[in-house]
Image (tube, rainbow, N blue to C red):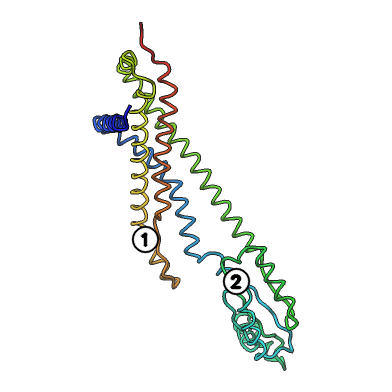
Amino acid sequence: MTPGTVATRHAQALLGALGRLARAPLATVLTLLVIGLALALPAALGLLVRNAQSATGGFGRAVDMSVYLKSGVSLARADELAVNARAVPGVAAVSVISATEGLRQFRQYSGFGAALDALQTNPLPNVLRIVPRASASGVASLEGLRRTFARWPEVDMVQLDAQWVLRFNAILAVVRRLVAIAAALFGAGVLAVIGNTIRLEILNRHDEIEVTKLVGGSNAFVRRPFLYTGTLYGLGGAMLAWLVLEGALLGLRAPVAHLASLYGSAFELTGLAGRELLALFGGGMALGWLGAWISAHRHLRDIEPRA
């Protein structure tokens, strides 16, 4: 069999599958709706995680550490230490909070202003506020930075709330696991829907399949149009899922942008990127092909020409 003949038969099978879907528009649309919603839900969860990370700027900006200098370290020396701290790998930004500024903030927010007036000297030290890079926001990296600064002779104490890192990473891990579980469950649902649809089509075309086998048609030849039908269902469902997500984002962009502006942020919702779109469409087509293959492989064996 020449490559041209093979391509022609595949084209015939594809066109035949398209024709059968077009001849039953209501059933096709209902099936695509079920598949599209099943694919849209895990994709929406994945978008939620990505946009939430983008809105918060990742965990790198949510974590910092306070390096308390010894009481005898002057403000000029604190500025020099800040320059040295900026050269430490994993550090994104360093700011100096002077003892005077620290006392002012404490007086403003603590409610002990009258009591502080009785103090003869400022008991607070100069402080370096260290902001780690996003790549160094893990627990191990932060602990390494803490040990580095704690070894400096001018440093009295380094304060780091690592529990926030643990909690944030744990929440992200749970949400990612939920996305994976949802994708697996809804993927199984897509397989079931397409498999049952192909099973019904095989039953409706029982006599046609029997005649095809009687004149020498192989199982692979008979199975081919059903595989294309399943693939088209998967592709159509993925396209519908993408349209659903884009519609939801279109309705949410304005209120989310308004909410972000109230917090002084320019955050905007983003949709599926190129690689995510490829995964959605490729996953939909793969699920459609697999569901059709399983159903066709199982049921076509039971159809044999009668003597």
- How crowded pointer 1 is (Cα within 10 Å; few <14, some 14-19, many 20+) is rated as some
- How crowded pointer 2 is (Cα within 10 Å; few <14, some 14-19, many 20+) is rated as many
Q: Quadrant of residue 61?
A: bottom right
Residue at 38%, 13% in the rendered image: 304
What's under tag 2, amino acid-wise?
Pro
Question: Percent from the top left, x then y, of residue 58?
Answer: 53, 64
Residue to which mark 2 is pinned: 132
Residue at 43%, 24% in the rendered image: 297
From the viewer's perspective, is residue 191 above or below residue 102?
A: above
For marks 2 and 1 on the same chain, the one whose residue lies earlier in the sequence: 2
> Viewer-nearest of labels 2 and 1?
2
Can you name the residue that lies furthest to the front here? 2
Residue at 57%, 77% in the rendered image: 93
Question: Percent from the top left, x then y, of residue 106?
Answer: 63, 82
Q: Where's the C terminus, which quadrant?
A: top left
Can you name the residue that lies furthest to the top here? 307
Residue at 42%, 20% in the rendered image: 299
**Viewer-side residue, 87 vs 54:** 87
Question: Percent from the top left, x then y, of residue 248?
Answer: 36, 53
Q: Where's the N terminus, which quadrant?
A: top left
Query: At numbered mark 1, what does the secondary structure look like: helix, strand or loop?
Result: helix
**Viewer-side residue, 131 vs 88:** 88
**Viewer-side residue, 16 vs 51:** 16
Residue to which mark 1 is pinned: 253
Q: How many marks?
A: 2
Residues tagged 2 and 1 counted as in contact (Cβ below 8 A)? no
Q: Quadrant of residue 211?
A: top left
What's under tag 1, amino acid-wise?
Arg
Question: Percent from the top left, x then y, of residue 34?
Answer: 37, 37
Residue 153 left/right relative to 79: right
